[in-house]
Image (tube, rainbow, N blue to C red):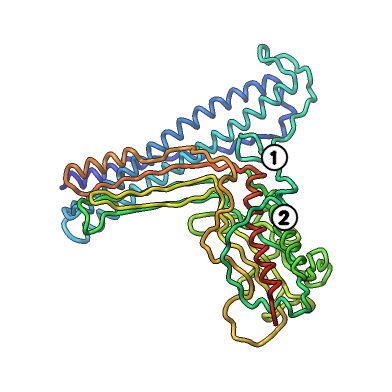
Protein backbone atom coordinates (compact mmCIF):
# COMPACT_ATOMS: atom_id res chain seq x y z
CA UNK A 1 0.00 0.00 0.00
CA UNK A 2 2.89 2.38 0.69
CA UNK A 3 3.98 1.99 -2.91
CA UNK A 4 0.54 3.09 -4.11
CA UNK A 5 0.60 6.13 -1.85
CA UNK A 6 4.03 7.10 -3.12
CA UNK A 7 2.87 6.60 -6.73
CA UNK A 8 -0.05 8.98 -6.29
CA UNK A 9 1.91 11.65 -4.43
CA UNK A 10 5.02 11.57 -6.59
CA UNK A 11 3.03 11.42 -9.83
CA UNK A 12 0.99 14.48 -8.93
CA UNK A 13 4.03 16.40 -7.67
CA UNK A 14 6.27 15.50 -10.60
CA UNK A 15 3.68 16.70 -13.08
CA UNK A 16 3.54 20.16 -11.51
CA UNK A 17 5.24 22.21 -14.26
CA UNK A 18 7.13 25.47 -14.09
CA UNK A 19 5.33 28.02 -16.25
CA UNK A 20 7.03 30.81 -18.11
CA UNK A 21 5.50 34.25 -18.30
CA UNK A 22 2.82 34.44 -20.97
CA UNK A 23 4.11 36.05 -24.19
CA UNK A 24 2.65 39.32 -25.36
CA UNK A 25 -0.46 39.02 -27.56
CA UNK A 26 0.06 39.11 -31.31
CA UNK A 27 -1.88 41.96 -32.86
CA UNK A 28 -3.39 41.28 -36.25
CA UNK A 29 -3.08 44.92 -37.32
CA UNK A 30 -0.43 47.36 -36.09
CA UNK A 31 -0.41 51.11 -36.57
CA UNK A 32 3.11 50.80 -38.02
CA UNK A 33 2.08 48.38 -40.80
CA UNK A 34 2.11 51.05 -43.50
CA UNK A 35 5.75 51.84 -42.67
CA UNK A 36 6.98 48.27 -43.20
CA UNK A 37 9.25 47.48 -46.11
CA UNK A 38 8.72 44.38 -48.21
CA UNK A 39 11.67 42.71 -46.49
CA UNK A 40 10.27 43.47 -43.05
CA UNK A 41 6.86 42.10 -44.04
CA UNK A 42 8.50 38.97 -45.46
CA UNK A 43 10.61 38.39 -42.33
CA UNK A 44 7.75 38.94 -39.91
CA UNK A 45 5.52 36.62 -41.92
CA UNK A 46 8.16 33.89 -41.58
CA UNK A 47 8.34 34.55 -37.85
CA UNK A 48 4.60 33.87 -37.64
CA UNK A 49 5.24 30.37 -39.02
CA UNK A 50 7.68 29.84 -36.17
CA UNK A 51 5.15 31.21 -33.66
CA UNK A 52 2.50 28.80 -34.98
CA UNK A 53 4.88 25.84 -34.67
CA UNK A 54 5.83 26.85 -31.11
CA UNK A 55 2.16 27.27 -30.19
CA UNK A 56 1.31 23.81 -31.52
CA UNK A 57 4.11 22.29 -29.43
CA UNK A 58 2.90 24.20 -26.38
CA UNK A 59 -0.65 22.94 -26.94
CA UNK A 60 0.56 19.35 -27.10
CA UNK A 61 2.64 19.84 -23.95
CA UNK A 62 -0.29 21.39 -22.09
CA UNK A 63 -2.65 18.61 -23.16
CA UNK A 64 -0.12 15.99 -22.01
CA UNK A 65 0.25 17.73 -18.66
CA UNK A 66 -3.53 17.96 -18.23
CA UNK A 67 -4.01 14.29 -19.10
CA UNK A 68 -1.29 13.24 -16.69
CA UNK A 69 -2.81 15.39 -13.97
CA UNK A 70 -6.16 13.68 -14.56
CA UNK A 71 -4.40 10.34 -14.30
CA UNK A 72 -2.94 11.39 -10.95
CA UNK A 73 -6.42 12.41 -9.83
CA UNK A 74 -7.77 8.99 -10.76
CA UNK A 75 -4.96 7.36 -8.84
CA UNK A 76 -5.77 9.48 -5.79
CA UNK A 77 -9.47 8.61 -6.02
CA UNK A 78 -8.71 4.92 -6.37
CA UNK A 79 -6.28 5.04 -3.45
CA UNK A 80 -8.94 6.71 -1.35
CA UNK A 81 -11.54 4.08 -2.25
CA UNK A 82 -9.22 1.23 -1.27
CA UNK A 83 -7.99 2.84 1.93
CA UNK A 84 -4.41 3.15 0.72
CA UNK A 85 -3.98 6.50 2.42
CA UNK A 86 -4.69 4.76 5.72
CA UNK A 87 -1.06 3.70 5.76
CA UNK A 88 -0.15 7.24 6.68
CA UNK A 89 -0.95 6.25 10.23
CA UNK A 90 -4.27 7.74 11.22
CA UNK A 91 -7.62 9.03 9.98
CA UNK A 92 -6.06 12.48 9.83
CA UNK A 93 -3.21 11.14 7.78
CA UNK A 94 -5.65 9.42 5.46
CA UNK A 95 -7.57 12.66 4.92
CA UNK A 96 -4.42 14.70 4.41
CA UNK A 97 -3.02 12.21 1.95
CA UNK A 98 -6.23 12.14 -0.02
CA UNK A 99 -6.67 15.93 -0.08
CA UNK A 100 -3.02 16.64 -0.91
CA UNK A 101 -2.87 14.18 -3.78
CA UNK A 102 -6.16 15.29 -5.30
CA UNK A 103 -5.23 18.96 -4.91
CA UNK A 104 -1.88 18.49 -6.65
CA UNK A 105 -3.45 16.49 -9.45
CA UNK A 106 -6.28 19.01 -9.88
CA UNK A 107 -3.83 21.92 -10.01
CA UNK A 108 -1.70 20.14 -12.60
CA UNK A 109 -4.76 19.38 -14.72
CA UNK A 110 -5.98 22.96 -14.59
CA UNK A 111 -2.56 24.38 -15.41
CA UNK A 112 -2.15 22.01 -18.34
CA UNK A 113 -5.56 22.94 -19.69
CA UNK A 114 -4.82 26.64 -19.22
CA UNK A 115 -1.50 26.34 -21.04
CA UNK A 116 -3.13 24.45 -23.91
CA UNK A 117 -5.88 27.09 -24.20
CA UNK A 118 -3.35 29.94 -24.16
CA UNK A 119 -1.27 28.22 -26.82
CA UNK A 120 -4.35 27.68 -29.00
CA UNK A 121 -5.19 31.38 -28.73
CA UNK A 122 -1.61 32.35 -29.61
CA UNK A 123 -1.76 30.06 -32.67
CA UNK A 124 -4.98 31.77 -33.77
CA UNK A 125 -3.37 35.20 -33.30
CA UNK A 126 -0.25 34.20 -35.25
CA UNK A 127 -2.31 32.84 -38.14
CA UNK A 128 -4.40 36.03 -38.24
CA UNK A 129 -1.26 38.18 -38.26
CA UNK A 130 0.27 36.01 -40.99
CA UNK A 131 -2.86 36.46 -43.09
CA UNK A 132 -2.73 40.23 -42.63
CA UNK A 133 0.97 40.36 -43.57
CA UNK A 134 0.32 38.22 -46.66
CA UNK A 135 -2.41 40.59 -47.81
CA UNK A 136 -0.16 43.58 -47.18
CA UNK A 137 2.75 41.93 -49.04
CA UNK A 138 0.59 41.25 -52.08
CA UNK A 139 -1.19 44.62 -52.01
CA UNK A 140 2.11 46.50 -52.06
CA UNK A 141 3.32 44.42 -55.00
CA UNK A 142 6.28 42.93 -53.14
CA UNK A 143 8.36 40.18 -54.74
CA UNK A 144 8.64 36.81 -52.98
CA UNK A 145 11.77 35.98 -55.02
CA UNK A 146 13.42 39.25 -53.98
CA UNK A 147 11.79 40.70 -50.84
CA UNK A 148 14.46 43.40 -50.66
CA UNK A 149 13.20 44.96 -53.90
CA UNK A 150 11.10 48.12 -53.78
CA UNK A 151 7.32 47.60 -53.75
CA UNK A 152 5.38 48.26 -56.93
CA UNK A 153 2.45 49.84 -55.00
CA UNK A 154 4.02 51.41 -51.89
CA UNK A 155 0.85 53.26 -50.85
CA UNK A 156 -1.53 50.31 -51.18
CA UNK A 157 -3.90 49.78 -48.25
CA UNK A 158 -5.36 46.53 -46.93
CA UNK A 159 -9.05 46.53 -45.92
CA UNK A 160 -9.71 45.95 -42.24
CA UNK A 161 -10.73 42.35 -41.53
CA UNK A 162 -14.31 41.60 -40.51
CA UNK A 163 -14.78 40.99 -36.82
CA UNK A 164 -15.39 37.25 -36.75
CA UNK A 165 -14.33 34.33 -34.61
CA UNK A 166 -14.38 31.78 -37.39
CA UNK A 167 -12.44 31.45 -40.62
CA UNK A 168 -15.53 30.09 -42.36
CA UNK A 169 -17.25 32.15 -45.04
CA UNK A 170 -19.90 34.36 -43.46
CA UNK A 171 -23.47 33.33 -44.14
CA UNK A 172 -26.08 35.58 -45.73
CA UNK A 173 -27.70 38.26 -43.61
CA UNK A 174 -31.25 37.50 -42.44
CA UNK A 175 -33.90 38.43 -44.96
CA UNK A 176 -36.79 40.80 -44.34
CA UNK A 177 -39.20 37.85 -44.49
CA UNK A 178 -37.21 36.06 -41.79
CA UNK A 179 -37.07 39.07 -39.48
CA UNK A 180 -40.78 39.83 -39.89
CA UNK A 181 -41.76 36.36 -38.69
CA UNK A 182 -43.42 35.60 -42.03
CA UNK A 183 -41.56 32.29 -42.23
CA UNK A 184 -42.54 31.13 -38.75
CA UNK A 185 -44.25 27.75 -38.47
CA UNK A 186 -46.87 26.95 -35.80
CA UNK A 187 -45.45 25.77 -32.47
CA UNK A 188 -47.37 24.32 -29.54
CA UNK A 189 -46.80 26.47 -26.47
CA UNK A 190 -48.09 26.11 -22.93
CA UNK A 191 -48.46 29.49 -21.27
CA UNK A 192 -49.27 30.92 -17.89
CA UNK A 193 -51.29 34.15 -17.95
CA UNK A 194 -51.56 36.29 -14.82
CA UNK A 195 -53.76 39.38 -14.45
CA UNK A 196 -54.46 40.16 -18.12
CA UNK A 197 -57.04 42.71 -16.97
CA UNK A 198 -54.16 45.09 -16.19
CA UNK A 199 -53.81 45.65 -19.93
CA UNK A 200 -57.15 47.46 -19.86
CA UNK A 201 -56.25 49.92 -17.07
CA UNK A 202 -55.58 52.87 -19.39
CA UNK A 203 -58.25 52.38 -22.00
CA UNK A 204 -56.31 49.64 -23.84
CA UNK A 205 -53.27 51.87 -24.22
CA UNK A 206 -49.92 50.10 -23.78
CA UNK A 207 -46.34 51.37 -23.77
CA UNK A 208 -43.52 49.04 -24.85
CA UNK A 209 -40.25 50.95 -24.41
CA UNK A 210 -37.92 48.05 -25.18
CA UNK A 211 -37.49 44.30 -25.58
CA UNK A 212 -34.69 41.96 -24.54
CA UNK A 213 -33.32 38.93 -26.39
CA UNK A 214 -30.83 36.74 -24.51
CA UNK A 215 -28.49 34.48 -26.52
CA UNK A 216 -26.07 31.70 -25.59
CA UNK A 217 -22.37 32.43 -26.27
CA UNK A 218 -20.63 29.43 -24.71
CA UNK A 219 -21.17 26.74 -22.13
CA UNK A 220 -20.82 23.19 -20.94
CA UNK A 221 -22.98 20.11 -20.47
CA UNK A 222 -22.01 17.12 -18.35
CA UNK A 223 -23.31 13.83 -17.00
CA UNK A 224 -22.13 11.39 -14.35
CA UNK A 225 -23.36 7.95 -13.36
CA UNK A 226 -22.12 5.58 -10.66
CA UNK A 227 -22.99 2.00 -9.89
CA UNK A 228 -25.62 1.54 -7.22
CA UNK A 229 -25.60 -0.72 -4.20
CA UNK A 230 -27.58 -3.29 -6.20
CA UNK A 231 -25.14 -3.50 -9.09
CA UNK A 232 -22.12 -5.67 -9.61
CA UNK A 233 -18.77 -3.90 -9.61
CA UNK A 234 -17.74 -0.35 -8.80
CA UNK A 235 -17.68 2.01 -11.76
CA UNK A 236 -18.17 5.68 -12.57
CA UNK A 237 -18.84 7.19 -15.98
CA UNK A 238 -18.40 10.89 -16.64
CA UNK A 239 -19.04 12.77 -19.88
CA UNK A 240 -18.78 16.44 -20.76
CA UNK A 241 -18.86 18.72 -23.78
CA UNK A 242 -17.78 22.34 -24.02
CA UNK A 243 -19.08 24.57 -26.79
CA UNK A 244 -18.67 28.13 -27.98
CA UNK A 245 -20.67 30.14 -30.48
CA UNK A 246 -19.14 32.13 -33.33
CA UNK A 247 -20.85 34.80 -35.41
CA UNK A 248 -22.92 36.75 -32.88
CA UNK A 249 -21.85 40.39 -32.80
CA UNK A 250 -23.53 43.32 -31.10
CA UNK A 251 -25.18 44.74 -34.23
CA UNK A 252 -26.61 41.34 -35.16
CA UNK A 253 -27.96 40.71 -31.65
CA UNK A 254 -29.60 44.14 -31.64
CA UNK A 255 -31.13 43.39 -35.04
CA UNK A 256 -32.77 40.28 -33.58
CA UNK A 257 -34.02 42.22 -30.56
CA UNK A 258 -35.55 44.88 -32.81
CA UNK A 259 -37.28 42.19 -34.89
CA UNK A 260 -38.75 40.67 -31.73
CA UNK A 261 -39.81 44.12 -30.52
CA UNK A 262 -41.49 45.08 -33.80
CA UNK A 263 -43.31 41.76 -34.01
CA UNK A 264 -44.84 42.14 -30.55
CA UNK A 265 -46.04 45.65 -31.32
CA UNK A 266 -47.71 44.43 -34.52
CA UNK A 267 -49.42 41.57 -32.67
CA UNK A 268 -50.72 43.79 -29.86
CA UNK A 269 -52.08 46.37 -32.29
CA UNK A 270 -53.86 43.64 -34.21
CA UNK A 271 -55.41 42.58 -30.88
CA UNK A 272 -57.09 45.99 -30.65
CA UNK A 273 -54.63 47.93 -28.49
CA UNK A 274 -53.01 51.33 -28.93
CA UNK A 275 -49.29 50.74 -28.48
CA UNK A 276 -46.82 53.50 -27.68
CA UNK A 277 -43.27 52.69 -28.78
CA UNK A 278 -39.93 54.02 -27.55
CA UNK A 279 -40.06 56.63 -30.30
CA UNK A 280 -43.35 57.90 -28.84
CA UNK A 281 -42.09 58.29 -25.26
CA UNK A 282 -38.32 58.84 -25.54
CA UNK A 283 -38.65 62.60 -24.94
CA UNK A 284 -40.45 62.25 -21.62
CA UNK A 285 -38.25 63.49 -18.79
CA UNK A 286 -38.04 60.24 -16.84
CA UNK A 287 -37.30 58.25 -20.01
CA UNK A 288 -34.47 60.60 -20.98
CA UNK A 289 -33.12 60.36 -17.43
CA UNK A 290 -33.35 56.56 -17.27
CA UNK A 291 -30.05 54.74 -16.80
CA UNK A 292 -28.65 52.80 -19.74
CA UNK A 293 -26.19 49.95 -19.89
CA UNK A 294 -22.75 50.70 -21.31
CA UNK A 295 -22.78 50.87 -25.10
CA UNK A 296 -19.28 49.37 -25.29
CA UNK A 297 -20.56 45.80 -25.12
CA UNK A 298 -23.66 43.74 -24.43
CA UNK A 299 -24.58 42.80 -20.84
CA UNK A 300 -23.63 39.23 -19.90
CA UNK A 301 -24.81 36.67 -17.40
CA UNK A 302 -23.97 33.09 -16.41
CA UNK A 303 -26.46 30.40 -15.56
CA UNK A 304 -26.15 26.62 -15.19
CA UNK A 305 -22.70 26.45 -16.75
CA UNK A 306 -23.75 28.58 -19.74
CA UNK A 307 -22.87 32.18 -20.59
CA UNK A 308 -25.26 34.58 -22.31
CA UNK A 309 -25.44 38.07 -23.77
CA UNK A 310 -28.59 40.19 -23.73
CA UNK A 311 -29.46 42.69 -26.44
CA UNK A 312 -32.07 45.43 -26.77
CA UNK A 313 -33.18 46.95 -30.10
CA UNK A 314 -30.71 49.82 -29.65
CA UNK A 315 -28.23 51.24 -27.15
CA UNK A 316 -30.83 53.84 -26.13
CA UNK A 317 -33.29 51.05 -25.28
CA UNK A 318 -30.82 49.00 -23.24
CA UNK A 319 -31.99 50.19 -19.83
CA UNK A 320 -30.31 49.35 -16.55
CA UNK A 321 -31.91 46.47 -14.66
CA UNK A 322 -32.14 47.14 -10.92
CA UNK A 323 -31.80 44.86 -7.93
CA UNK A 324 -35.41 45.26 -6.84
CA UNK A 325 -37.37 46.50 -9.83
CA UNK A 326 -35.58 44.27 -12.35
CA UNK A 327 -36.29 45.28 -15.94
CA UNK A 328 -38.89 47.80 -14.69
CA UNK A 329 -36.54 49.62 -12.30
CA UNK A 330 -36.00 52.68 -14.51
CA UNK A 331 -39.75 53.11 -15.08
CA UNK A 332 -41.13 52.66 -11.58
CA UNK A 333 -41.11 54.63 -8.36
CA UNK A 334 -42.38 53.29 -5.07
CA UNK A 335 -43.58 50.15 -6.84
CA UNK A 336 -45.76 52.16 -9.23
CA UNK A 337 -45.31 52.76 -12.94
CA UNK A 338 -44.17 56.22 -14.01
CA UNK A 339 -46.39 55.86 -17.06
CA UNK A 340 -49.77 57.11 -15.85
CA UNK A 341 -51.41 57.00 -19.27
CA UNK A 342 -50.58 53.44 -20.33
CA UNK A 343 -49.88 49.93 -19.06
CA UNK A 344 -46.12 49.32 -19.11
CA UNK A 345 -45.14 46.15 -21.04
CA UNK A 346 -41.63 44.69 -21.44
CA UNK A 347 -40.90 41.36 -23.20
CA UNK A 348 -37.95 38.99 -22.67
CA UNK A 349 -36.91 36.04 -24.84
CA UNK A 350 -34.10 33.55 -24.13
CA UNK A 351 -32.60 31.13 -26.67
CA UNK A 352 -29.84 28.52 -26.71
CA UNK A 353 -28.00 27.31 -29.79
CA UNK A 354 -26.39 24.86 -30.09
CA UNK A 355 -28.66 22.45 -28.27
CA UNK A 356 -27.05 20.36 -25.56
CA UNK A 357 -28.20 17.57 -23.28
CA UNK A 358 -26.78 14.75 -21.18
CA UNK A 359 -27.81 11.13 -20.76
CA UNK A 360 -26.76 8.44 -18.33
CA UNK A 361 -27.84 4.87 -17.62
CA UNK A 362 -27.08 1.80 -15.53
CA UNK A 363 -26.89 -1.85 -16.51
CA UNK A 364 -26.33 -4.91 -14.34
CA UNK A 365 -22.55 -4.64 -14.62
CA UNK A 366 -22.08 -1.29 -16.29
CA UNK A 367 -22.81 2.43 -16.23
CA UNK A 368 -22.69 4.94 -19.05
CA UNK A 369 -22.80 8.71 -19.49
CA UNK A 370 -23.02 10.76 -22.66
CA UNK A 371 -22.95 14.48 -23.43
CA UNK A 372 -24.61 15.57 -26.67
CA UNK A 373 -24.42 18.75 -28.74
CA UNK A 374 -26.58 19.47 -31.83
CA UNK A 375 -26.84 22.40 -34.27
CA UNK A 376 -30.47 23.20 -33.47
CA UNK A 377 -31.97 25.94 -31.29
CA UNK A 378 -34.22 25.90 -28.24
CA UNK A 379 -36.34 28.68 -26.80
CA UNK A 380 -35.67 28.46 -23.07
CA UNK A 381 -38.31 30.98 -22.13
CA UNK A 382 -40.59 33.74 -23.32
CA UNK A 383 -41.86 36.31 -20.85
CA UNK A 384 -43.92 39.47 -21.23
CA UNK A 385 -44.40 41.29 -17.94
CA UNK A 386 -46.62 44.31 -17.39
CA UNK A 387 -47.47 46.93 -14.78
CA UNK A 388 -50.87 48.58 -14.85
CA UNK A 389 -52.25 51.40 -12.73
CA UNK A 390 -52.14 51.13 -8.91
CA UNK A 391 -54.71 48.82 -7.34
CA UNK A 392 -55.20 46.69 -4.23
CA UNK A 393 -55.51 42.92 -4.68
CA UNK A 394 -54.06 39.57 -3.66
CA UNK A 395 -51.06 38.81 -5.88
CA UNK A 396 -50.78 35.34 -7.41
CA UNK A 397 -47.58 36.01 -9.34
CA UNK A 398 -45.97 38.63 -11.55
CA UNK A 399 -48.59 39.98 -14.00
CA UNK A 400 -47.81 38.87 -17.52
CA UNK A 401 -47.52 35.89 -19.86
CA UNK A 402 -44.81 33.25 -19.73
CA UNK A 403 -43.97 29.88 -21.25
CA UNK A 404 -44.38 26.84 -19.01
CA UNK A 405 -42.27 24.30 -20.96
CA UNK A 406 -38.64 23.84 -20.00
CA UNK A 407 -37.53 24.13 -23.64
CA UNK A 408 -39.23 24.63 -27.00
CA UNK A 409 -37.43 23.40 -30.11
CA UNK A 410 -37.65 26.23 -32.65
CA UNK A 411 -35.33 24.87 -35.37
CA UNK A 412 -33.24 21.77 -36.04
CA UNK A 413 -30.39 23.70 -37.67
CA UNK A 414 -29.28 27.22 -36.84
CA UNK A 415 -25.69 26.88 -38.02
CA UNK A 416 -22.72 24.54 -38.45
CA UNK A 417 -21.42 22.45 -35.57
CA UNK A 418 -17.81 21.34 -35.61
CA UNK A 419 -16.06 19.06 -33.13
CA UNK A 420 -12.76 20.87 -32.69
CA UNK A 421 -11.08 18.57 -30.15
CA UNK A 422 -11.47 15.24 -28.41
CA UNK A 423 -10.20 15.98 -24.91
CA UNK A 424 -10.95 12.54 -23.49
CA UNK A 425 -8.23 11.73 -20.91
CA UNK A 426 -7.14 8.40 -22.41
CA UNK A 427 -4.16 8.13 -20.03
CA UNK A 428 -6.35 8.57 -16.97
CA UNK A 429 -8.92 6.10 -18.31
CA UNK A 430 -6.24 3.50 -18.95
CA UNK A 431 -4.75 3.98 -15.48
CA UNK A 432 -8.17 3.64 -13.88
CA UNK A 433 -8.76 0.39 -15.75
CA UNK A 434 -5.37 -0.86 -14.61
CA UNK A 435 -6.04 -0.15 -10.95
CA UNK A 436 -9.43 -1.77 -11.25
CA UNK A 437 -7.97 -4.96 -12.73
CA UNK A 438 -5.29 -5.10 -10.05
CA UNK A 439 -7.38 -4.61 -6.94
CA UNK A 440 -11.00 -4.01 -7.99
CA UNK A 441 -10.85 -0.47 -6.67
CA UNK A 442 -13.31 0.83 -9.25
CA UNK A 443 -13.19 1.87 -12.86
CA UNK A 444 -13.57 5.61 -13.56
CA UNK A 445 -14.01 6.47 -17.24
CA UNK A 446 -14.28 9.98 -18.63
CA UNK A 447 -15.08 11.36 -22.09
CA UNK A 448 -14.92 15.01 -23.10
CA UNK A 449 -15.02 17.08 -26.28
CA UNK A 450 -14.80 20.67 -27.54
CA UNK A 451 -17.22 22.09 -30.13
CA UNK A 452 -17.46 25.24 -32.22
CA UNK A 453 -20.90 26.34 -33.37
CA UNK A 454 -20.82 28.86 -36.24
CA UNK A 455 -24.22 30.43 -36.77
CA UNK A 456 -25.93 30.72 -40.14
CA UNK A 457 -27.20 34.29 -39.77
CA UNK A 458 -30.44 33.75 -41.67
CA UNK A 459 -31.19 30.30 -40.21
CA UNK A 460 -30.31 31.49 -36.70
CA UNK A 461 -32.58 34.52 -37.06
CA UNK A 462 -35.26 32.21 -38.44
CA UNK A 463 -35.12 30.11 -35.28
CA UNK A 464 -35.31 33.19 -33.08
CA UNK A 465 -38.30 34.59 -34.93
CA UNK A 466 -40.02 31.21 -35.04
CA UNK A 467 -40.07 31.19 -31.25
CA UNK A 468 -40.71 34.92 -30.87
CA UNK A 469 -43.57 35.12 -33.36
CA UNK A 470 -45.42 32.09 -31.99
CA UNK A 471 -45.05 33.38 -28.45
CA UNK A 472 -46.17 36.90 -29.40
CA UNK A 473 -49.25 35.48 -31.12
CA UNK A 474 -50.20 33.81 -27.81
CA UNK A 475 -49.54 37.03 -25.90
CA UNK A 476 -51.84 38.92 -28.27
CA UNK A 477 -54.49 36.22 -27.89
CA UNK A 478 -54.37 36.59 -24.10
CA UNK A 479 -54.54 40.38 -24.46
CA UNK A 480 -57.54 40.19 -26.80
CA UNK A 481 -59.47 38.06 -24.32
CA UNK A 482 -58.68 40.25 -21.28
CA UNK A 483 -61.69 41.35 -19.26
CA UNK A 484 -62.13 43.73 -16.35
Secondary structure beneath label 2 = helix
Report if the CB atoms under discs 1 and 2 are less than 8 Å apart: no
Name the residue located 21 percent from the left edge and 58 percent from the top edge: 230
Quarter occupied by residue 269? bottom right
Q: In this view, does 483 lie to the left or right of 97?
A: right
Where residue 51 sits in the image (x, y, percent)? 54, 29
SS state under label 1: loop
Residue 339: give x, y in percent of width and height: 76, 76
Q: Residue 219 at what x, y percent from top left? A: 51, 51
Q: How many labels does the image show?
A: 2
Q: From where the camera sits, is residue 77 visible?
A: no
In the image shown, does 186 or 256 lie closer to the viewer? 186
Question: Which circle marks residue 159 in the picture?
Answer: none
User: Mark 2 highlights which residue?
Assistant: 259
- Decide which of 156, 178 is in the foreground and name it: 178
Image point (67%, 58%), residue name: 469
Residue 444 at x, y = what percent? 29, 47
Quadrant of the image occupied by residue 165: top right
Task: Using a 10 Å C-alpha cutoff, classify the residue at mark 2 as few (fewer than 14 neighbours), some (14 to 19) or many (20 or more).
Answer: many
Left or right of residue 302: residue 29: right
| Local crowd size for mark 1, using a 10 Å CA cut-off: few (<14), some (14–19), many (≥20) | few
Q: In the figure, residue 426 lies in which quadrant?
A: top left
Residue identifier under label 1: 172
Q: In this view, does 126 lie above or below 10?
A: above
Amino acid sequence: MRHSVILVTVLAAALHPVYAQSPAPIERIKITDNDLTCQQIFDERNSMDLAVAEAKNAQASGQTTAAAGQAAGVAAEVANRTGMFGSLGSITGQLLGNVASKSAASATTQMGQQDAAQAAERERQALARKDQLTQLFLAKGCSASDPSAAPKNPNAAVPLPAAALSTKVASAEPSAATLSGARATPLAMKLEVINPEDLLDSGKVLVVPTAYVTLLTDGRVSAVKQTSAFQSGDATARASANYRVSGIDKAYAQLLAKAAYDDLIVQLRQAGYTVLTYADVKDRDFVRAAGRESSASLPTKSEGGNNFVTAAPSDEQNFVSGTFGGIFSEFTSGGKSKFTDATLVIPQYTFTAPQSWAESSRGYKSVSAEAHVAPGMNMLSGRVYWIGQPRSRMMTGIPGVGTKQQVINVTEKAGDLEKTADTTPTTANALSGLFNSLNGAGNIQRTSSEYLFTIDRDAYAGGIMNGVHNFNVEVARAAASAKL
